[in-house]
Amino acid sequence: MSSAAATCGCPAPYVGPPLTATCGAGQFLVFMGLLDGYLRAQCDVADPCGRVSCRSAPRDLDYDFVVVGGGSGGAVAAARLSEVPGWRVLLLEAGGDEPPGSQVPSMVLNYHGGELDWNYSTEPETAACQGYPGKRCKWVRGKVLGGCSVLNGMMYLRGHPKDYDYWAAAGNPGWGYRDVLPYFLKSEDNRELGEVDAAFHGSGGPLTVQRFPDRPAMADHILQAGRELGYGVSRDLNGANFTGFAIAQAKNRNGSRVSSARAFLRPARGRPNLDVMLNSTVTRVLIDEKTKQARGVEFVLNGQKRSVRVSKEVIVAGGAVNSPQILLLSGVGDKQHLAEVGVPLRHHLPGVGKNLMNHVAFFVSFLARNETSRYDLDWAAATEYLLKRSGPMSSTGLSQVTAKLSTKYADPSGDDPDLQMFFAGYLAGCAKTGEVGARMDDGPRSVSISPVVLHPKSRGRISLRSADPLAPPLIRANYLTHRDDVNTLVEGVKIAVRLGATRALARYGLELDRSAPPGCDMPFGSDAFWECAVRQFTGPENHQAGTCKMGPDSDPDAVVDSSLRVRGVKGLRVMDASVMPALVSANTAATIMMIAEKGADMVKEVWKQGSVTSRAGWAGHWPGGRDHGWPGKPAAAGWSAPGWRRNSPGANRLRDVAASSGNPGWNSWTG
């Protein structure tokens, strides 16, 4: 019997990989092995009694719904659909369950590049990633129950209201901010309503949101540095103020990660109508050639091909890479491309795989000359976490700090930032001996500041490498091919350099890394130098989106309609980041969960079971009533907030998109 089974009173099958595999063997083996064992014995962290029971084979050959992918969107969709007792729901996930170590916030980077990761790389880039082997950038994508919500930094941000109003204006009714906010609230269980703008938050939902219980002193000094440069400090970037520096809230509970699987699937583990299968890679959706109706799903388990039939709908939720790949393998996509790779055509839909977007960054590195380079993980930190769920292991270090800022290229209103800043350092991820004060090396501590382009204009594409469903797809990111992305990123780098030189951070003796990337022989610090640097060592964020674009009939690249139904194929929807017409200006996890929440309600309405909460029932979630606009903003009929005046840049952008998408009524609203 394992230690967890003895302690927690239920069977505790081993879920790998162990922490030793994520830090490397050798000198890390003993300490990290002991720590891994202790974590597995913590009932709330390992959660052996609360995990979903996974099947080794389908219970039935027929299901009402099959959800493909158990990530940020798929876990939500499967949990919500299985709320209807009479519906049989099967969730197929290509990876395994999340290991206990991944629940520890400070281990946020440990599982990147391992067996929980698809380990994708882009094709050779022409304008970015030039300093990496093969001119390829690596992409972290979760191959595990919970998907990227098991590997990401847990930051809970939704973006800007304008992001969603832009979606609606582009011909997607029902996706404006006032429409989607109730679904954010539906998921949320915010434990700090007194410390945020409570009107914008929910409580009692399955997704726990709060700040980490620990942060390094430098985190607060970064906020001071922001003030010193004239920027504001926001207590809630999801609230009334969308700009400034902040200690972000995160998806965590009692000092441990809350993935989509932990939040949504584990509470549903006792439902007899929900089946979950792991290590099951979907190879295609079975579509009737004549009727173009989704009839089932084919998948590979333990090297053997299997299939199940579907009576109602298939929900594809593989993410921005795998969802278009699955559609293409199913014969849904551009007919010329499918003919080239030898996939039989089921429906010509040329937009599948197009419109690939991602936030792009650059890591500005500093040495903290007044601090030694030591391990932040030691026996003291481990003991504090094991006993109290606090201390350095209960947070992501400096990565919980962020900022939303406007460069000179942003919307002149100042209310629609085009830049986000991330920070890194003080992360208790790995250690060799656990000795308190043990040095990594003889040098000083290092930290980094990463500017991120929030509204990228460069577009890439996902396509098939071959008809082999197990071959990785071709990923052409096309980073920095649009001049505006380069300009914004260079401005962000200069802001990061100025931050490092503030009085607030002088106590750390920050020294900018002045080493020049290969081929960047321009004067250091010039715009030309930084442009060369960002093209050499481009930083891709894990925010890929847009490859199954939501859009109206008039959009030739639209893959799904505003109900998330795949155009031209009956009984097939997509519910993940791939449906975003444009990237939200924030981390994407919260938005993906919202998409699945709303998508599940749409399915329930169609099949006449009723949504969990009717549309009319959401009025109570609107402070002052639904017709009064979102909290803190004027009603639609009389908007005059900064950035939303008639003929303002923000309104004009919406007007142009809406008019071109067959919505002429927006001209009178903005004109």
Image (cartoon, grey):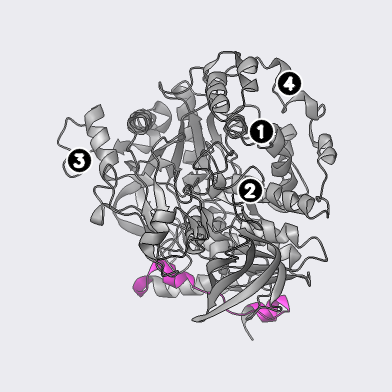
Of the residues under marks 1 and 4, which one precedes in the sequence?
A: 1
Question: Residue flagged by tag 4: what amino acid is it?
Answer: Ala
Whether residues under marks 1 and 3 lie with C-beta atoms below 8 angstroms apart, the answer is no
Residue picked out by circle 3 = 516
Residue 247 on image: x %, y %: 56, 38
In-front residue for pair 234/637: 637
Residue occupying the point 73% across, 36% down: 194
Q: Between disc 1 and disc 2, whose residue precedes?
A: 1
Residue that label 4 marks: 635
**Residue closer to the observer: 165 or 64:** 64
Q: Is residue 194 left or right of residue 357?
A: right
Q: Within 10 angstroms of label 1, few (less than 14), some, or many (20 or more) residues?
A: some
> Marks 4 and 3: CB-CB under 8 Å?
no
119 w.r.t. 497: above or below: below
- Please tell me in which quadrant of the rendered image residue 91 appears: bottom right
Per the image, label 2 sits on a secondary structure element best described as loop
Q: Real-space Cα distance between discs 1 and 2?
A: 17 Å
Q: Could you tell me which secondary element the residue under label 3 belongs to?
A: loop
Label 1, on which residue?
A: 177
Disc on res. 564: 2
Front tag of 1 and 2: 2
Residue 189 in the image: above or below residue 162: below
